[in-house]
Image: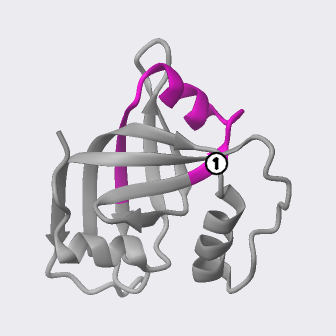
Amino acid sequence: MGIQLSDEIKALFRGPNFAHLATLMADGSPQAAPVWVDLEGDHILVGTGEGTLKARNTRRDPRVAISIVAQENPYLEAQIRGRVVERRHEGTLEHMDRVSHRYTGRPFPWRDAAGRVTLVIEPERARYVALPSTHAPA
């Protein structure tokens, strides 16, 4: 059963912020990978290749976790737990072009749509944190 994401969390997912997607290996151990993310309503979208570990893991077990921090202020963060509820093969390049423009200012560089998939993640739990710190590395 999905939940609604707060405006603060949605802002993190709409910005050019890298997220980390955790999936479960066959033995139950976690596997995490940095990903570009997008939103569709309250669903989180992640584009990938069908042969990637994250795609293979979510075919077997749809449960995932995502962490994301604001690029301009890494003390703004969110953690999401949910599950992959849909796998889209149609329109993957259009989706990846839109996301790539946000992150790089250019179209997605790999133009072969064969084997591409968009994972649609329904959030089940979400937590937003704004820590009172200032990022000032020494």
Query: Residue 59 colored magenta?
Result: yes
At label 1, which amino acid type do we have? Thr
Viewer-proximal residue, 27 or 8? 8
Q: Is residue 29 above or below residue 112?
A: above
Q: Is residue 24 above or below residue 1?
A: above
Viewer-proximal residue, 88 or 101? 88
Q: Position of residue 41 (x, y in %)?
A: 31, 65
Residue depicted at x 40% and y 76%: 14
Q: How is the image coloured?
A: one colour
Residue depicted at x 74% and y 82%: 106
Q: Position of residue 57 (x, y in %)?
A: 53, 27
- Quadrant of the snapshot with the N terminus: top left
Residue farthest toward the front in the current orientation of the protein: 90
Tell me which segment is drawn in magenta.
Answer: 47-67
Q: Is residue 13 above or below residue 71?
A: above
Q: Position of residue 74 (x, y in %)?
A: 34, 76
Q: Mark 1 = which residue?
A: 48
